Each structure stands twice: as C-alpha cells, then as structure tokens.
Image (cartoon, grey):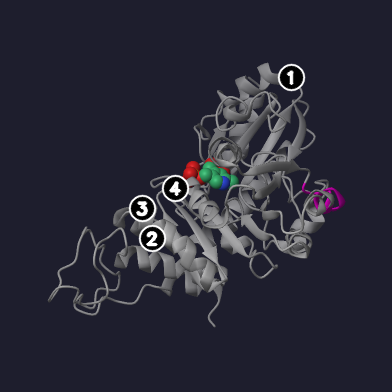
Amino acid sequence: MAEFSTRAIHSGQEPDERTGAVVPPVFLTSTFVQDGIGRMRNGYEYSRSGNPTRDSLQEQLADLDGGVRALSFSSGLAAEDALLRAVLAPGAHVVMGNDVYGGTHRLVNRLHVPWGVELTTVEMSDLDAVRAVLQAGEPGRTVVLWVETPTNPLMKIVDIAALAAIGHEVGALVVVDNTFASPYLQQPLALGADVVAYSTTKYLGGHSDVVGGAIVLRDEELAERVGFVQFAAGAISGPMDAWLTTRGIKTLAVRMERHSANAQAVAEALVGHPAVERVFYPGLESHPGHAIAAKQMRGFGGMLSIALTGGPEAARRFAESTEVFQLAESLGGVESLIGYPSEMTHASVKGTELAVPEHVVRLSVGIEDVADLVADVEQALTR
Ligand code: PLP
C-alpha cells in the first residue's frame, strides 16, 4: 500500500473516464437519469442517497484512516449526531472527557439527554477514573466512550490505545474525535479505536472555506447503520463542499508538517515570557502529555493555547492585538487565527465544569512565515 501523502492525492481520485480529466469533475447535480424505471446507469439515483463527488471524498477519507468506509456530512456536529443516533437509544450511557469540545457536549446534553440518554463526563487522563465510570451500573450500560485528543482548547493528551482497551472491556464503542490531529498526525483505528469523527472544516479542508464533517468506521455493519442515518436524515455534504474538502486533503501532509513546525517555534518563543503564565502545547517536553503524544502522534500539530499572567484583561488585549493572527472562531486553516475561548468557541459551556479559564487564549498557527508569526505574538504581548 502506498504511503500517506500518495494516498491523500490519489485515493478516490481516478481520472474522469469520459474525458480523461485528471481532476474528477464536480457532480453538481441533484438527480440522475434512469434508462427505465429503477434502471440507474451507475447506481446513482438522487444526491441525498449518493453523489460521485461525495463518494470520491468518502473513499479518500476511509483510505487515510484505514477504515472500511467513511461518511461525509454537512458539519462536524452533523457527523457526530448521525453516529450517535445510529448507536444510542433511551437508557444508553455516553462517557466523555470533562474538557470535551463544547459543541459535542451541547449536542449530547441538549439533544440526546432529553431523549433519555445518560451522559457522564470524566477526567480522561485518569485511566482508573474512566474504568470506574465504565464499570459502574449494569453490564453493557455504557454504549459510547467518546475520546478527544488533543483537546480543544487546553491541549490535553490522552492515551488512545489504553482507553480503547478499557472501553472494550465493557463492550463500549470507542470513538475518537481526531479533528485537532488529522489522520496525518494520528491514526486512531490503528491504535484500537472503533470510529473516528472529524470536523473536516478544520485541517482536512484546511483553507477555512468549507464547513463539513466525517465519520470513519472499521466495521461494515455499523457503517451501514450510520449510512442509513445519513440517507434518512439527510445531513449530507453537498458536491461543492465535498470537492473543496477533497482538494484540501491532497495537501494535508505538507500542511501538517508546516503547521507543526510553526506551532513548535511559536510555543518555544512564548515559554518563559514574563507575560505568559503557561503554554499548552504537546510538543513541549514540559507538557504533561508529551510522552504519550510522542508515542501516538507523528507530530504535535498546529494548535496551542496560552494562559496570561495578567489575567482575563491581558488575555482579551492579547487576542485583540495580533496582526497576522486574525481574531476569529474556527481553526486548522492555512492562515493563523486567534480566539478567546471563554467568550467565543466555548461560550456555551461557561459556568460548567467544561468552562475554559478566562485568562486563556487559543492560537491556530497557520503556515505563514514563522518569523512573522513569532514577531506578531511578541509584539502583541507588549501592548
Ligand atoms: N470537534 C472539534 C474538536 C471541534 O473543534 C469542532 C468545531 O470547532 C467540532 C467537532 C464541530 O465541528 P463543526 O463546527 O464542523 O460542526
């Protein structure tokens, strides 16, 4: 099997049969002609049930994570919801980290819990605590163990292989949200997870020009069930969105190398700065998850957060003072972004145990020239 970068460019991307176009066309069509009632030409009938551009992205995604199938959706949360709807029923128990992405928590807590699902959050780096939560109650009670690593925004690292083993002891489905790492840096299925979830809006798309999500599965039967939700509820990615994501994925490997190198340099420049209380970046040897990250990731990624010594005031000022880093929600694009989580991405979990400290600022380090990025954070810290 070819290496990752080669597969990222060629999987699902066969030249167009009719014209020889190297880049397969974007199938901007809602429906497909039938040669007789129910006699489809290539199995395609209607674009909610199937579209060649979406199929080409799904093939590319499945290949990159070593799954049997991938399903692509209109957003990361739509992808998560489809998976959860396929596996949960009233009475089912879901276990998540106590710093899981706020939108994922809101999805389960506000939409699935009222329907009868039970949700427990736990410190995921404490394996004994996770085991205790999973083994409490009736056998088979916990249906989903939801793992995120690195976490958003405090960059906590948890051991995927260890959590997969603990989850499987009680028959739970082990899902990894691999949005921050991307399949280039981390391969959850190879580490023992059952399902990988993505906001493809971030590194996979990579250019801040499309919102999307995906689920990658190793089990054909479960893939059928999630595929049915995709078809029946219809939160599909449209052809243009699917194509933009496919185009982004072709350069994923080189982008992730550069994101990681730039973030490492920015993190090192910030460590020890008098205005900075703490730098959260797994590539720093001082990071508590550094050894696990080094074991399970190919590189440490482009995301980092900092806590400022000057408190919330200083954090807000810093977030509003960078010039190359633009103040915006989201992450994972070629351009550097800065965010103030407690009032932007994580406003929905304010006042809960998932709340992000108000002196924390999150940086999505882009692939611009590293000297410009370091100079930008340094000047913003002096404001
Ligand atoms: N998972 C993580 C880790 C995220 O950061 C996000 C969005 O920020 C999502 C899931 C949700 O994805 P989307 O915004 O594409 O619905």
**Of helix, strand and loop, which mostly describes the magenta segment?**
helix
Mark 2 or mark 4, earlier in chain = 4
**Dot 4 corresponds to which residue?**
75
Q: Quadrant of residue 272?
A: top right
User: Which mark, by number, is residue 310?
Assistant: 1
Mark 4 or mark 3, earlier in chain = 4
Instruction: Say what amino acid the circle numbered 2 marks.
Output: Arg
Look at 67% across and 60% down and name the residue there.
Answer: 174
Calculate the distance from the C-alpha at mark 4 to the C-alpha at mark 3.
12 Å
Nearer the camera: disc 4 or disc 3:
3
Mark 3 or mark 1, earlier in chain = 3
In the rendered structure, the answer to whether residue 76 lies left or right of residue 168 reads left
The residue lying furthest to the right in this view is 128
Q: State the extent of the magenta-drawn residues as a range.
A: 124-131
Element carrying mark 3: loop
Calculate the distance from the C-alpha at mark 1 to the C-alpha at mark 4.
36 Å
